[in-house]
Image (tube, grey):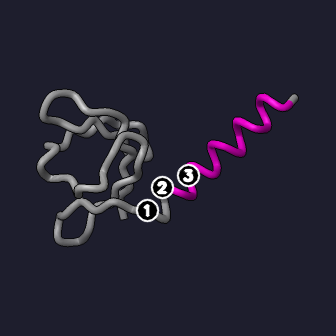
Amino acid sequence: MKFLYLDRFEGRFAVCEDDKREVILLEKKSLPQKAKEGCILRFENDGTVVFDEKETKARLKLVQSLEKKLFDK
């Protein structure tokens, strides 16, 4: 399963990064409606792209934990 981090929008494209930090451009119209900057997207077996709410929340929680450790010292 391939996950993508939606970094930003540029024109008609969504600029995403995979777990290897490779940049992937997707047309906005191919994204689910809930997709926004900072969310995690997942490719399904049929080639569709879906918003992965569970993975988005998990990664956000990890980032918040790391920020807390960094700034609470």
Q: Earlier in the sequence, mark 1 or mark 3?
A: 1
Residue receiving disc 3: 59
Could you tell me which quadrant the N terminus lies in? Answer: bottom left
Residue 41 falls in image quadrant: bottom left
Residue drawn at x 27%, y 35% as measured from the top left: 15
Residue drawn at x 19%, y 64% as measured from the top left: 48
Left or right of residue 12: residue 70 = right
Region rendered in magenta? 57-72
Residue drawn at x 42%, y 42% as measured from the top left: 38
* Closer to the eye: label 1 or 3: 1
Residue drawn at x 62%, y 43% as measured from the top left: 63
Residue receiving disc 2: 56
Label 1 crowding class (10 Å Cα cut-off): few <14, some 14-19, many 20+?
A: some
Q: What x and y, as percent, mark residue 23?
A: 30, 35
Does the stretch in magenta take in 60? yes
Residues tagged 1 and 2 counted as in contact (Cβ below 8 A): yes
Q: What x and y, as percent, mark residue 46?
A: 17, 71
Calculate the distance from the C-alpha at mark 1 to the C-alpha at mark 3. 10 Å
Does the stretch in magenta take in 68? yes
- Which amino acid does the dot numbered 2 rest on? Thr
Secondary element at image label 2: helix
The residue positioned farthest toward the right in the image shown? 73
Relative vertical location of residue 17 with respect to residue 33 in this rendering, above or below: above
- Which amino acid does the dot numbered 3 rest on? Arg
Label 2 crowding class (10 Å Cα cut-off): few <14, some 14-19, many 20+?
A: some
Q: Nearer the viewer, residue 23 or 37?
A: 37
Secondary element at image label 1: helix
Calculate the distance from the C-alpha at mark 1 to the C-alpha at mark 2. 5 Å
Residue receiving disc 1: 53
Residue 11 falls in image quadrant: top left
Residues tagged 2 and 3 counted as in contact (Cβ below 8 A): yes
